[in-house]
Image (spheres, rainbow, N blue to C red):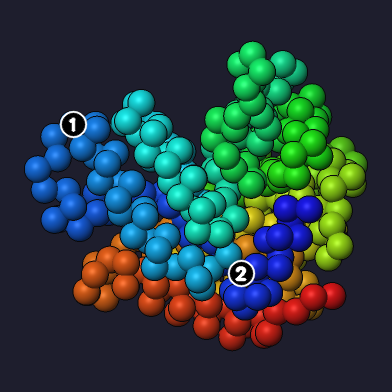
Amino acid sequence: MIVDTLIEKIIQKQNPTCVGLDTSFDYLPNAMRAGASTAEDAADAILMFNRGIIDAVSDIVPSVKVQIAYYEQYGPAGMRAFLETLRYAKEQGLVVITDAKRNDIGATASQYATAYLGESKVGETAFSAFPSDFLTVNGYLGSDGIVPFVNECKAHDKGIFVLVKTSNPSSGELQNLKLEDGRTVYECMGDMVEKWGEGTVGKYGYSSVGAVVGATYPEEAKVLRARLPRTFFLVPGYGAQGANAEMLKNCFDSNGLGGVVNNSRGVLCAYKKRGGSYDEAARAACLDMKADLLGVLGAICAK
């Protein structure tokens, strides 16, 4: 199970960190941006920057999350940079999460699932269009928008992270509303995720159908951790969005398992505060984050 692979890398590296490659062209050092005037120039520079980050951190972090919006804006050149970033991260042994929050219903959901988790076919040739280990998806269209993704997870040993309680300030406008049965919307969605993942539970007790649970809402995270014992969490909100290690401890079980914590700007832009090269600063930021998380979670071990 891919969730077991992620957990084993977290245990091996004692680091439940995911580096977010939400790479804005503006984040790059001046020297890397100098002279760029086309979408192709920007995409090439972003890819070079990403490779430097991956080289600097691949031995100390288990995973990266690549946010597709930062690449789509540069058109075909940006999507090539996105694809090459996915491939390079996998080559370096990282678990790769595509953050695209895809969804639709029926046949269209199946096409999205094939693009990121399955295999496309042309004649007798099969290929993975955008090879990802996990994909973020939006579950608020209901089961017929999620089952195609779950089917691909089972067929190809892949995973998804379903939006449950997101880290943005206005998430409560919908997600915290109460239903007639007394549950909040986010609790209802969490219960659905736990159900969708029943056929993908690995040896560590967690499913490859995970949930996005923001670190910026620790009380809601505590409710969800208790409610969803088999659901692995992707935890955004650390660092630039305001959450610290103490706030996100509720996302984890007593062994320090159960989640992986994303940090994007805090790693990508670390050189702006620390000085020095961007890749060395990114590595230092990851080591600081590891120490911060372990200071709250303690040593991470198998159940």
The residue under label 1 is 38
Residue type (three-letter) at the residue carrying disc 2: Pro
Q: Residue at x 89, y 45 (%)?
A: 199
Circle 2 SS class: loop
Circle 1 SS class: loop
Residue furthest to the front = 124
Disc 2 packing (10 Å; few <14; some 14–19; many ≥20) = many
Residue 283 sits above or below residue 260 on the image: below
Judge by depth and name the residue closer to the eye, 271 or 63.
63
The residue under label 2 is 16
Residue furthest to the left = 35
Q: Position of residue 156 (x, y in %)?
A: 74, 39
Which of the image's four quarters has the C terminus? bottom right
Residue type (three-letter) at the residue carrying disc 1: Thr
Q: Residue at x 37, y 39 (%)?
A: 81
Residue 114 visible somewhere in the drawing: yes
Residue 219 visible somewhere in the drawing: no
**Which quadrant of the structure image shows residue 8?**
bottom right
Left or right of residue 152: residue 85: left
Residue 104 sits above or below residue 62 on the image: above
Q: Earlier in the sequence, mark 2 or mark 1?
A: 2
Q: Position of residue 159 (x, y in %)?
A: 71, 45
